[in-house]
Amino acid sequence: MLLFALLSTAHAECRPVINELLPDALGADSGDEWVELLNAGDSPCDLTGWRVESAMNAWRTATTFESLTLGAGEIILLGDAPAEIEVAFNLGNGDPNSDAVRLVEPDGTVADIVVYGGPNDDGWTTESGEPASPVAAPNAGLSLGRCPDGSDTDDNAADFVVFVVPTPDAPNLTDPCTPTDTGDTGSNDTGDTSDTSDTFDTSDTDDTSGVSDSARTDDSSDSGAAREEVGSCGCAGRGSGAVVGLLLAGMAAGRRRR
């Protein structure tokens, strides 16, 4: 019994990550930017004394946790009220150079870092000190999130996707999410993942997924050129996640897992 307990303890892992962030809010960013943390491990994480830092051309501390423990699988939202921990973020938009957010241990060890936008002219590095591979910066009102939750290969471009429907303080979409490109038919959007030139059309509600175009990027003037568009899933970029219906259900039922 003692040996089993020791083996179980040896395999227990605390693994806090930056799971999702919204660096560029619609309109003025002030008060609307947020960062979501997740303990992707199977044991509690004591984050007392840890800090979250952001950088445009230099690192600055956004907050230091006076007392914070994240249970296994627990999510916590940092930002303006009603976030669980109020933090006044000043995040860059990833333009014209890459910007970054990182989670730092009390001794200065970088536990997790997200680099987005480009190019990486400021030389931001991964947790291991290697040059970072940035993920493309999201447009205003869209978030960057790990897909699936907690995925961490130290390659931002591989771990993160753009969420057309952000999921603050709730589980992210999960793999697989590969929308079938059946061709764009104008106002009846059937999931054309190659179309990236459309603008938001809040009057078009004829999408086959039943989601209003206020959270989509397709309209009847579709020219089929180049911008990120989603069909049956709520993520863009590399096209991974779950269907929007599951996302909306998760947002209703998945608040703060413990």
Image (cartoon, rainbow, N blue to C red):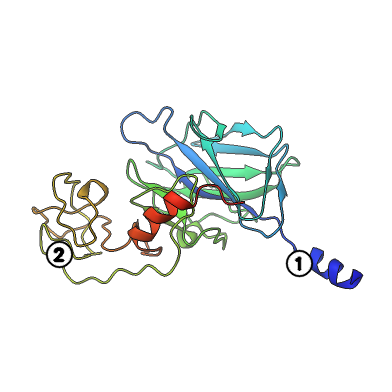
Residue 111 x, y percent position in the rendering: 66, 50
Give amino acid for label 2.
Asp
- Which quarter of the figure has residue 25? top left
What type is the residue that disc 1 sits on? His
Q: Vertically, is 233 above or below 34?
A: below
Q: How many marks?
A: 2
Residue 118 in sight here: no
Question: Which percent across, then down, holds residue 138?
Answer: 36, 47
**Residue at (43% x, 40% y) in the render:** 23
In screen coordinates, is 55 left or right of 198? right
Decide which of 39, 140 is in the foreground and name it: 39
Q: Residue 174 carries which label?
A: none
Asked whether, in this view, residue 242 is left or right of residue 8, the answer is left
Residue 104 in sight in this render: yes
Query: Judging from the image, what secondary structure is the residue with disc 1 in?
Result: helix
Image quadrant assignment for residue 233: bottom left
**Callout 2: 10 Å neighbours few (<14), some, many (20+)?**
many
Q: Residue furthest right?
A: 2
Looking at the image, tell me whether mark 2 or mark 1 is earlier in sequence order: 1
**Residue at 52% in and 60% down:** 155
Element at badge 2?
loop
Pick the front one: 256 or 105: 256
Q: Where is residue 46 in the image (x, y as percent from the top left)?
A: 73, 45
Q: In this view, does 190 lie above or below 197?
A: below
Question: Relative to 48, is 228 on the left or the right?
Answer: left
140 horizontally vs 41: left or right: left
Q: Which residue is drawn at 22% across and 50% down?
A: 212
Which residue is tagged 2? 184
The front one of 222 and 171 is 171
- The residue at which mark 1 appears reads as 11
